[in-house]
Image (cartoon, grey):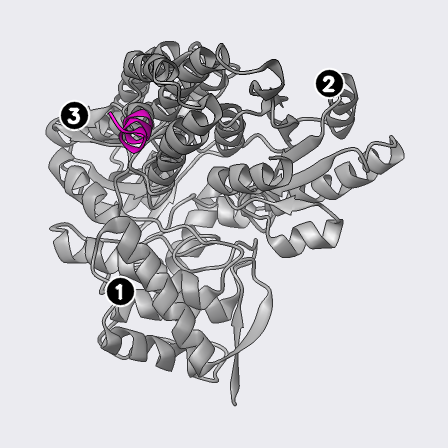
Amino acid sequence: MGKAELFEQAAQAVVDANKDAAIDIAKQAIAEGIDPVEMINDGFSVGMSRCGELFDTGELFLPELIVASDAMVSAIAVLEQAMPVEQTSKKLGIAVVGTIEGDVHDIGKGIVATMLRVYGFEVHDLGRDVPINVFVEKAKEVNANIVGSSALMTTTQVGQKALEQALKDAGLRDKVKTMVGGAVCTQRWADKIGSDLYAENATDAVTKLKELFS
Amino acid sequence: MTKYITRMGDGQRVEMTADELMRDFELGTQDAAKRGKIDPLTQDDLKYLLEIFTCTNKIVSVEPGNEVVLTHDIGSLRLNGDQANSGVGIPLSRIQGIGVHERAFAADTFELGHIDYSYKPVKPIISMEQTEMETAQLTTTIPLFYGAMPNLGTYYRPDGPFGNPSDLLPMGKIQEAREAQEEAVHHATRDMIYIGEKMNAVGGDGLNFDTTGAAGDADMKATLHAVEYLKQHTDLAIEVGMAGEFVLGIHGGLEYDGVRLAGLYPHQQVKLVEKAGADIFGPVVNTNTGKSIAWNLSRALTFIKACVQVSNIPVHVNVGMGVGGIPVFETPCIDSVTRASKAMAEIAKVDGL
């Protein structure tokens, strides 16, 4: 079987969330002497990107995305055995996320947390109605380099501005990238309060953070 | 070139030329067409939309003969609720609020709703709500619904007995998350039927399921089952209003009448709502705060026009804060509200707002 064909099969195994097939393809790649990094980048990761596109268009949903991610992670675990230690996959970043104090809307934020995990970030989800100091303390505790806050109401949105200040006061602002999201947020709001990133939705959050941390 | 005053999705006032407006109309309708796999608006539609946007009057209205029914949700919270509840904080009772809507605002229908505005918390206070409904019915002549949200979130921890999918899914506990939702469907259906029957018993004219699907596909499944039962066993008129343009697949595998609920757009949602027996459908298209109102309204019209074309029941589109081409802003801007309302009536051909 040609390399291109194996890459395609790897991508399809992820899209199909077929863990067994993904593992078999990874083993076959090692047996055929294909570079494991190439196999991940041009095969399994391509499948995960396709999953992201399907999620964005509403043809694939969160539970399926998680199972697809599991298939990819399992295949990578096999490939990593054939990789030098310095090449093994590592976390893209450590993110602390939560819905800002006073706001109980957490479905969207939960999707962002799940998507970030799926795409290789370590995520600490603080839940909803999270006091500002809890974001700060958690970021310190886990040595986060991303702090993401969600707000669905203009009445709670101001908490995102307070979070920026609290991170500055704690001496953490230069160590983390901040990201804001939620229905009422815009790029203009992010610029106004000094947040590094605005994410329109979960896919946007993943795309922008991957660009920053890859 | 002449610039026209319009808005961004968050309410910011901006000025755009006719070319810029038309470009955003095109982009908005194409986005909806691509996502929903439906037809974009026609060039005639877009030209008419441009006329609406370039009218220099602050407010616009429909031509005589194009008037539509005005249905209201959220009860009188719009008046007596606080800002976080989309209200304006005027201290008046619910009965007074209903009277104001009927006699001062010329509402065609109205609803009684509790401040929690979810079905589950109404259960322990149902006799109080029945008394209020009976009193309201005796003092009004317009069709008066009882309204609340299916809100399956109230059945998940910490508010309810079942595991919270928002906690379980990120932990990879997919089976547990799905089972929790299936349990919640059963309980929510039972509760909504209970409340519907109680309102029917005191002469309620109808029941409104507001923001259906807010907690995902399970939310919609519970609602459709409740509607089906209530239409067979009561005299209630039933309106199903949605939470968004798209049913979120938090479960992903739930079906109604053999159709997968996750991922349905308004023109697909309405067919299941019809099948369940509802009398009115209230589709929603969400506003994107980062895009112009030209983009948002064109996009919303595309979805709603497709929905109206296939629907056999009246379609009363949601046009309020953050939906139907209206900015996300507590006091929706009158220029945008009237333009969206006119376009929905005359381009999408909705039956009501």
Count of number-bearing discs: 3
State the SS at label 1: loop
Mark 1 falls within which chain?
Answer: B
* Observer-nearest of B27 and B223: B27
To which residue does mark 2 refer?
A142
State whether residue B142 appears in this view. no
Indicate the amino acid at tag 2: Val
Nearer to me, A162 or B339: A162
Task: Tell me where residue B311 appears, x and y as whole percent.
Answer: 14, 51
For marks 2 and 1, give the one nearer the viewer: 2
Subunit under mark 3: B
Q: Which residue appears farthest toward the front when viewing the image? A: A33
Which residue lies under the disc numbered 3? B229
Percent coordinates x, y for residue A206 in the rendering: 53, 36
Question: What's drawn in magenta, residue-wise?
Answer: A1-11
- Which chain is mark 2 on? A
Magenta stretch containing residue B297, yes or no? no
